[in-house]
Amino acid sequence: MVLGFLAGLGRIVLRACQEVGGLALFALEALSHLVRPPFHGRQFLRHFIEVAYFSLPVVALTALFTGMVLALQSYTGFARFNAQSAVASVVALSVTRELGPVLAGLMVAGRIGAAMAAELGTMRVTDQIDALTTLSTDPMKYLVAPRLLAATLALPLLVLVADIIGVMGGYLVGTAKLGFVPALFLNSTWDVLETMDVVSGLVKAAVFGFVIALMGCWCGYRSRGGAQGVGMATTSAVVLASILILALDYVVTEAFFAQ
Amino acid sequence: MTLTVTLEGVCKSFAGKTVLEGVDIAVAASSSLVVLGGSGSGKSVMLKCILGLITPDAGRILIDGRDVAALSRRERAALMDRIGMLFQNGALFDSLPVWENVCFKLLAQKRITRRAARDKAAEVLAQVGLAASVGDLSPAELSGGMQKRVALARAVAAAPDLLFFDEPTTGLDPIMGAVIDGLIVDCVQRLGATAISITHDMASARRIGQRAAMIYQGRIVWDGPAASLGQTGNAMVDQFARGEREGPISMELRR
């Protein structure tokens, strides 16, 4: 019984190692295509617009309401310590360092990661990926590399917009509802922010963008078994990307701010 | 210059299930071979092995006398440039309009400008009996027969030397099937290409093949003129050609 348990455990570990190794090789091969011609600029542009432009409304709304809630929550919480004046600083730091990149990442994972997995999965089960090979086109170069680059470059732009809108949400609630003087709120925000606060958020965004596209492409590219397989690939892509975003958020934060 | 294809003892298994068990067959340059076989007999796997989409477990596949497994990435790409393939379900790229599908290979290799590709697509679509206006449609807007014709146009647009057709008439009505077969014969003759088709449609096999071979349980069990199908003297082939229930080929049915 113990041997059976250990054998089962061993199989799980081996399977996990196989998956991680496969994912690493997949990522490396995709990255190698980014520096080797020919390049598919039109594909890159299509996916960049898809990620950066069409994700803007959902990311902007998420950032706006997050900033508004943050101002309200921190005001009521800080009132217990007579520290209401810190609201502007808390909103600015939380949004730029943490909430902007993480929430934008999670939103884009749901929108773009799922779409990538579904599109590539459907292409796999309908032989379109094999067709690419027979048309002298490397599927990794044509399908995966442009998506990885597009998401990695587009997410920082989205997060920059999310930062501005998130702080604006806090400003709106702070001035319209909580009675802050507009100029003082903006001054507090400006004074507390350092370049590294924004830069760290943008680096996180680039990492999250890469992870979202990687998981979307990885899960979709390997999908099997018709509609059910595509559905499973889509779910896996979103779940794995979301977990990795939260885990890598800690890693990047540690890299930037650990004392 | 057209290509020859030779398979020597090709074997392939999936998760312990043997699909190909030593396939041997040779296709001469500029000839047309039809491979017959029931569902699950390994026809598509054999085709994917030749195309390099699946790696065989054993045996050799020679195209123009060169072992495809020994080719470098660059040599394999050069070989792919000379190959055209029509997939069973068309496998058209649904994110691209028809004209881009047709000229995909030419555009991807930058052998043609986008403006010239539209004209080229119209020319190739005309060869398969479709109007130039079809080029602006999305594949999802086409009927099954039109999708097959667009897929055929895509397969022949770059004037390949070797053509593969995977179940070209599956899912089509008999008249449309005959139309597609006629177009395939026209395209193959015009290009002077070597053609390998797989099908279980006997009428289609007689129309498009000069030679036919039958695959059963992972082996080639018969090879001869396509015109003789039905009167080959081989009990398995004749049973298959006549669609008879009783005979040496037994379908595994659970009751």
Image (cartoon, rainbow, N blue to C red):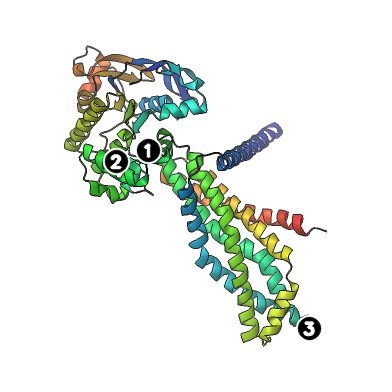
Q: In which quadrant is the C terminus of chain B drawn? A: top left
Q: CA distance from mark 3 to mark 2?
A: 75 Å
Q: Name the kind of residue labelled 2 in the image.
A: Lys
Marks 3, 2 in one chain: no
The image shows residue B114, relative to residue A254, as above or below, that is above
In-front residue for pair B33/B42: B33
In-front residue for pair B22/A167: A167
**CA neighbours of label 2 inside 10 A, class few (<14), some (14 to 19), many (20+):** many
Q: Which residue occupies 48% across, 37% down?
A: A138
Which chain is mark 3 on?
A
Label 1 SS = helix
Check contact, mark 3 vs mark 2: CB within 8 A: no
**CA neighbours of label 1 inside 10 A, class few (<14), some (14 to 19), many (20+):** many
Which chain is mark 1 on?
B
Check contact, mark 1 vs mark 2: CB within 8 A: yes
Where residue A103 appears, as percent x and y from the top left, is 60, 63
Where residue A248 appears, as percent x and y from the top left, is 68, 53
Q: CA distance from mark 3 to mark 1?
A: 70 Å
Q: Which residue occupies 59% across, 72% down?
A: A165
Q: Which residue is mark 2?
A: B120
Q: Which residue is mark 3?
A: A82
